[in-house]
Amino acid sequence: MQGAAWLQRFRRRWRGGSEAADGAAPEARGAAPPAEGRAAPAGRILIIGSPNVGKSALFNRFTGRYATVSNYPGTTVELARGRTSRVPGGAEVIDTPGMYSLLPITEEERVARATLVAEPPAAVIHVIDAKNVERMLGLTVQLVEAGLPVVVALNMWDEAAELGIRVDVARLEESLGVPVAATVATEGVGPGALAERLPEARPPRACLRVDYGPVLEGAISRIARLLGAAPGFSARARALLLLQGDAEEHTRVQRELGPDVAARVRRIVDDATRAAGHALHYLVAMARKSCADEILARAVQLPPEERTGLRERLSRFCMNPLTGLPLLAFVLYFGLYKFVGDFGAGTLVDFLESWFQDYVNPWVNAAAERALPWAAARDLVAGEFGVTTLGIRYAVAIVLPIVGTFFIAFSILEDSGYLPRLAMLIDRVFKRIGLNGRAVIPMVLGFGCDTMATMVTRTLESKRERLIATLLLALAVPCSAQMGVILGLLSGRPAALAVWAGVVTGIFLLVGAAAARVMPGERPQFYMELPPLRLPRPANIFLKTYTRMVWYLKEVLPLFVLASVIIWIGRLTGLFDLATGALVPVLRLMGLPPETAVAFLFGFFRRDYGAAGLFDVHQQGLLSGNQLAVAAIVLTLFLPCVAQFLIMKKERGLRVTLLVSAFVLAVAFGAGCATHLALTVLGVQL
Amino acid sequence: MIDPRIEEVLESLYESEVEQGRPSPLDAAAEPVRLACEAGLTAACGGGLRLTEPGRAAARDVVRRHRLAERLLVDVLDVAREDVEEDACQFEHIIRRGLDEKICRLLGHPRMCPHGKPIPAGLCCQSARADAIREVRPLAEGPIGGEGVVAYLSTRQRRDIQKLMAMGILPGSRIRLIRRFPSYVFQVGYGQFTADESLAAVIYVHWKEDANRERGAGGGGNRES
């Protein structure tokens, strides 16, 4: 790997510049404008449906914006908003995270349900995977029951047709009592026809009514009478949620109708549970299933469903440990090491850097010389450590190509449908560290950008899992930019590299296992849909990577510039000298020379930045193999970058973030001391 | 109907004599044992006790009812395993003739009790075997490549049920097991899913006999079974 080559270029700027976030973008969501006029529901369209059915693809077709589309459940974790002109007068369109039913399991499902209540839509597009129409009609039934203005989009129509599934759209419409349109959102087939049906969306007439049997029906009507008419879901739907033990709905009753009514509702639920002699949610589900089955029998023809052919053989190849693990090694070697390491961090960085050196920097320096007579002001924008010549160049020429190539590789993995199969392979290992296979997606993403990965931990089911995942990401998962620098630093010293990799992996597993023991909570449970393997579409890969890059520049560049300014102030006032002085005794404990103090101080801003500083010290011939390994370990485990800190605070709260940070610092220095001691006692020279 | 105390004697004798092939440890002088002898169900033999021909049939019947009751309690009624023995002992005496067949059918003609002891087959089991219905076993214990229909879900946890519903797994759903290791992989309808043991163990499936032979021939034809 040519990491060492581009690392040379870090030397000249690590002392002054800074940049902030670990690269790429948590989807394009933050960028979308907030909803205007929430009081006016007219013209708001909500897209909802199970995970991985193509909601975001449809959103993109409707609005011309880009919301990330992948081939695994849980790609969308936040709302995305846009406007469409496909309906007369225009409308706001909201894309929601996937939900399996109105009773949410994970956080992001809660988001979708809350939006349905908080922002009453003029139309709800329920996107259904036409291949799995029998599984998805249950949610349609619930939406119709809730009195929402539903329009059904039978998406992935092409895949269904390929399997020989025949849906009689007219009959389905008649049975459900709502408009239905067939679409292939990724190819842009059908959004027009769907849009034409949107004006027909209105609260359905009572033609679809599930019969829940005498016990439940009695309870439903008694609760519905207590609830009366209110905005949002129909009283019948709310009664059903209450009967299924939905906590949110209970809280709402308590809040809006007082403790008296809430207590009466609870009594009715208890009585019904006793009378039914069965868990009520089970009965409700069974009744809905038989209703959906009836509709299916009328409108859908299903051929034998066994998957065969190349696609299936390949899928099984991925999931068999004997073939899947070598495949994983292959993917890591070519995807990560060759493509991101060699091509991204080598070839691309070289190219962009020389372009900056040859054209941009001389021009900026000359312009500053002419326009700014004060040396301090010149230093701020230009010169060796300037905001433009260093902060922006660092972001654009070095970090951007690395995270860019990583996200191309990651997008291909995402769209192929490989990640859920990897989750299936690795679940048993992850159980040991208190997580389940589902966490593989944030963890792999963390190797690109820990900040983005921390956001994606939302797809994990329990608070405990989210916390453990956040901790491990902050501690032991190096992001691509950091990994590039560290690999460069240790290149040519395979023994030090091995010690580094061993210690970091060991700490990842050890801390995970310890956290799993210490933190109370339910055992994680693993389940995941395995979408069919698909050939990634280049247009989507390009669009997705592009969107993430735009996010990166928009959100992260200001942080880079800000950090540059802070460093500028620190150098002007001499505060940095004080801070480095305080670090020296700690470094001595780890057997590191005082010269590394500055590197560690910059490590506080960004871990990879500190590593680049180390490289400079190393160039001066001040570091032995042992010291290199120890320093690389400490900087890998070190506090994450500023952006990750901020996201952690947003997702987990300030208290947890401070605790995690303190823990990470302690473990980083502790591991440094321990490795130093162990190497010294064993007399090993790397 | 036989006196419950006599049924206990028959059960004990069946286990020692028929299943383990060793003499009964029962005291021949005890009251219930004497009653069983008087009814012609057991006879003295040497110093010990053995089942007569009609006794043997009756004993087989009691054992069958006991073990079916255990399965019912564990799989469907979700009774904790430590309470099963005692409850099943009560249960076996109140299951009338005919009712055992109904329970047997509901459970899909199980062959083993929860403790792994064989359940003596009834007439219903033989005719079921002719219909290619084997038994109800959890997905976690199913044959790879095996196909079946979900019989029931042995859990009362809302969390479990919600996830199973999300995968479209409810009684009556068709299901096929594809892999068991490192995680369970199965197909429901046209969708494939993966799950861990904790979920695969609560899905009880009515397996089709020798699913492999029927594969491809008419997978869609048997969906209403």
Image: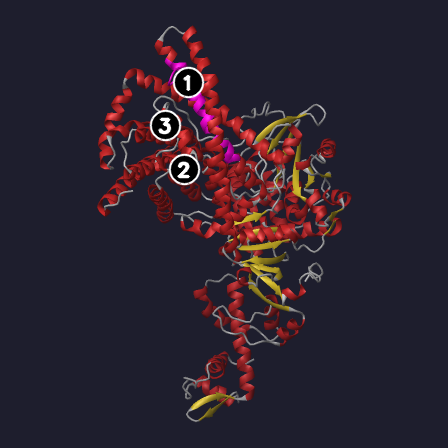
Q: Residue furthest right?
A: A170
Residue A280, visible in the rendered structure: no
Residue A438 against residue A187 in the figure, above or below = below
Q: Amino acid at mark 1?
A: Val
Q: Point out the tag, 1 or 2, that comes first from the N-terminus.
A: 1
Residue annotated with mark 2: A478
Q: Point out the tag, 3 or 1, that comes first from the N-terminus.
A: 1
The region drawn magenta spans A379-407
Q: Which corner quadrant holds the N terminus of chain B? A: bottom right
Residue B206 against residue B89 in the figure, above or below = above
Q: In the image, what residue occupies the spot 50% across and 47% down?
A: A328
Do the residues at discs 3 and 2 belong to one chain? yes
Residue A521, visible in the rendered structure: yes
Front: mark 3 or 1: 1
Q: Is residue A15 left or right of residue A336?
A: left
Residue annotated with mark 3: A605
| Host chain of mark 1 | A
Numbered disc 2: secondary structure: loop
Picture coordinates of residue A613, whole percent (x, y): 34, 28
Q: Amino acid at mark 3?
A: Phe
Do the residues at discs 1 and 2 belong to one chain? yes
Residue annotated with mark 1: A387
Q: Nearer the viewer, residue A56 or B7?
A: A56
